Image (spheres, rainbow, N blue to C red):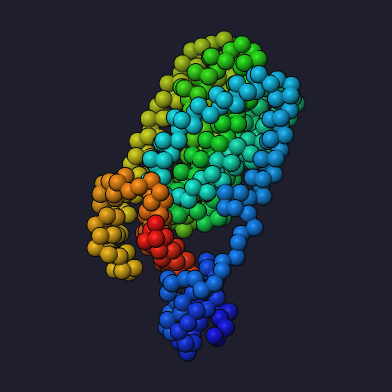
């Protein structure tokens, strides 16, 4: 076996005979060189096990440990209120989760990646924001913490969770940015609601706080952070600066968050319930506008994906059955629903691999062979997994 040449983009020469070589893009241990070009066929050895499961990372592990210790302290000093807070904090998940699952149908993301985003919101964004906001509240007052510190720190930390997904090559387009923003924000809302509900139990206002946070505004944090996710997703799709696009998305997220917190703080300090009513109406308008925007983006992404299927079929030798399924959105959903539950993950993997390739070929600025081969390898693996499911 000839050794792989060092050029990462064009790692072998036509003079090299066909055979298994170390994968130059490190997606798998081996990749088949057909004598002229790298193929999507991978395997040939045991893949090295990652140091951590894909749903964990060092920041998440550290955050989980610190969050668990903080929760244990709360249980020691206020066991009943904390237990009530823990139970009630999961209620918004029942409302938000179906919406995130609906959004994720465009390009299904790995379950482990969504769990990581959720845990980032709970353990990293939640813990850091809680510490910073507490320090600001102690030094400058509750109003400063609510209107200035919370929007800036919380949206920054949640945005880092979306950026972390970009670093892990999990964000391929606009919908991915919004989906990961939603998962991070949902995790953050769970830990924040836990603290609010526990405090409300101790203060005797649990019903009012539960209705406001869990039933009336469960989408507050996902709506705020969606702006950051939108900016990051657009940057990836258009191959633009992630930092520049994240900046304007972050600015809009902070503005919405500060306006919401500011109105509630003003109403609380002045006793002017009209401010809460106005804020509530504005939130409803923002919610409706966000729904319209997301539905429009989702439908556009659906049409673009199905329009790319014929090209993908030629390039990757899709069968007529695959073209018929993935080239028609309604038939694809119907096919998935008809599958036994244990076979749906493999179907989703094929769908996700095709969607990533469709986004890859739609991007401006041309294509790069390394990424193309990496995505082609993912499709090959997904189809093999579906065949054996």
Residue sitting nearer the eye, 371 or 288: 371
Q: Position of residue 320 (x, y in %)?
A: 24, 63
Q: Is residue 244 above or below residue 126?
A: below
**In this picture, residue 108 sits left or right of residue 261:** left
Assign the N terminus to one quadrant of the image.
bottom right
Q: Position of residue 21 (x, y in %)?
A: 52, 78
Residue sitting nearer the eye, 273 or 315: 315
Q: Is residue 235 above or below residue 151?
A: below
Assign the C terminus to one quadrant of the image.
bottom left
Residue sitting nearer the eye, 328 or 51: 51
Residue appearing at x 45%, y 69% in the figure: 373
Q: Position of residue 26 (x, y in %)?
A: 55, 68
Q: Is residue 357 visible?
A: no
Q: Is residue 179 visible?
A: yes
Report the number of numbered marks: 0
Residue appearing at x 52%, y 68% in the figure: 28
Residue appearing at x 57%, y 35% in the figure: 188
**In this picture, residue 62 sits left or right of residue 227:** right
Q: Is residue 251 above or below residue 49?
A: above
From this viewpoint, which residue is outermost toward the bottom? 15
Residue appearing at x 38%, y 46% in the figure: 341
Q: Position of residue 12 (x, y in %)?
A: 50, 82
Q: Is residue 368 above or below residue 347?
A: below
Toward which corner of the image does residue 85 lie, by quadrant? top right
Residue sitting nearer the eye, 196 or 33: 33
**In this picture, residue 75 sits left or right of residue 233:** right
Toward which corner of the image does residue 289 lie, by quadrant? top left
């Amino acid at each position: 076996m000839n050794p792989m040449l060092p050029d990462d983009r064009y790692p072998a020469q036509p003079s090299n005979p066909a055979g298994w070589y170390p994968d130059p893009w490190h997606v798998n241990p081996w990749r088949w060189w057909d004598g002229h070009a790298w193929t999507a066929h991978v395997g040939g050895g045991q893949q090295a096990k990652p140091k951590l499961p894909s749903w964990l990372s060092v920041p998440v592990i550290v955050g989980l440990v610190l969050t668990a210790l903080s929760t244990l302290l709360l249980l020691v000093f206020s066991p009943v209120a904390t237990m009530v807070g823990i139970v009630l904090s999961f209620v918004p998940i029942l409302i938000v989760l179906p919406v995130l699952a609906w959004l994720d149908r465009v390009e299904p993301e790995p379950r482990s990646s969504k769990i990581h985003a959720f845990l980032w919101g709970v353990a990293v964004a939640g813990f850091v924001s809680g510490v910073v906001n507490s320090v600001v509240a102690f030094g400058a007052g509750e109003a400063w913490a609510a209107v200035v510190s919370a929007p800036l720190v919380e949206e920054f930390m949640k945005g880092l969770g979306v950026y972390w997904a970009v670093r892990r090559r999990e964000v391929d387009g606009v919908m991915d940015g919004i989906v990961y923003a939603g998962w991070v924000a949902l995790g953050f809302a769970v830990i924040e609601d836990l603290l609010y509900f526990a405090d409300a139990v101790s203060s005797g206002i649990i019903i009012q706080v539960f209705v406001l946070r869990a039933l009336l505004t469960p989408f507050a944090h996902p709506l705020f952070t969606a702006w950051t996710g939108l900016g990051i997703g657009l940057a990836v799709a258009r191959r633009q600066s992630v930092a520049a696009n994240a900046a304007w998305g972050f600015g809009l997220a902070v503005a919405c968050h500060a306006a919401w917190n500011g109105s509630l703080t003003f109403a609380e300090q002045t006793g002017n319930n009209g401010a809460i009513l106005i804020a509530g109406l504005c939130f409803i308008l923002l919610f409706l506008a966000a729904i319209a925007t997301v539905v429009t983006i989702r439908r556009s992404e659906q049409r673009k994906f199905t329009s790319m299927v014929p090209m993908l079929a030629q390039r990757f030798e899709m069968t007529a059955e695959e073209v018929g399924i993935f080239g028609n959105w309604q038939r694809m959903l119907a096919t998935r629903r008809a599958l036994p539950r244990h076979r749906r993950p493999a179907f989703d993997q094929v769908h996700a691999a095709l969607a990533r390739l469709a986004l890859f070929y739609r991007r401006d600025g041309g294509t790069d062979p390394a990424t193309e081969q990496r995505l082609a390898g993912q499709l090959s693996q997904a189809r093999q997994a579906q065949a054996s499911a």
